[in-house]
Image (spheres, rainbow, N blue to C red):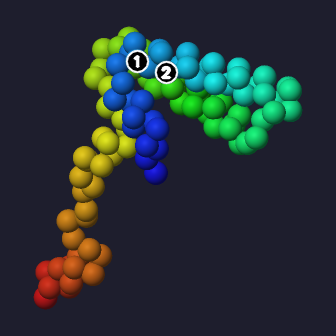
Amino acid sequence: MPNPLADEARSMTDSELGEAINEAYREVFNLQFQRGTRQLQNPMAMRQARRQVARLRTILRERHLAEAAGTPLEPLARIADEEEIEEPAESVEEQSDDAASEEE
């Protein structure tokens, strides 16, 4: 299932992605401070912020690896959607019917 946050991050430039990573780290720091002072209202916010940092860093790493390999970067999900799945030419029943008609 595609993640809208990841799709949005993939459309960012490298500099925008770096700024988003810094902002996400600041958010994690602020949430840790709030948790330490018992002011954190939503405990799930910590998890979401940490996952956002990981998501952004993963996208940046994908770009660096693709650049090093010299291949264009396309998300795997989009590549899989574009590829056509080849179906077998004939079904088993058709093959057995053909074999029976050849024997006659």
> Is residue 61 found left or right of 29 in the rendered image?
left
Identify the residue under disc 2: 20
Label 2: which secondary element: helix
Please report the residue visible at 68 percent of the width from the left and 25 percent of the height from the top. Answer: 28
Q: Are marks 1 and 2 in contact (CB under 8 Å)?
A: yes
Q: Position of residue 30 (x, y in %)?
A: 70, 23
Between 15 and 100, the residue placed more toward the observer is 15
Amino acid at circle 1: Glu
Indicate whether 54 appears above or below 85.
above
Q: Position of residue 51 (x, y in %)?
A: 62, 33
Q: Residues within 10 Å of mark 2 (few under 14, many from 20)?
A: some
Check residue 16 in the rendering and tell me which mark sits there, or answer none.
Answer: 1
Between 25 and 42, the residue placed more toward the observer is 42
Amino acid at circle 2: Ala
Please tell me in which quadrant of the rendered image residue 86 appears: bottom left
> How far, Cα to Cα, is label 1 from label 2?
6 Å
- Farthest front residue in view: 39
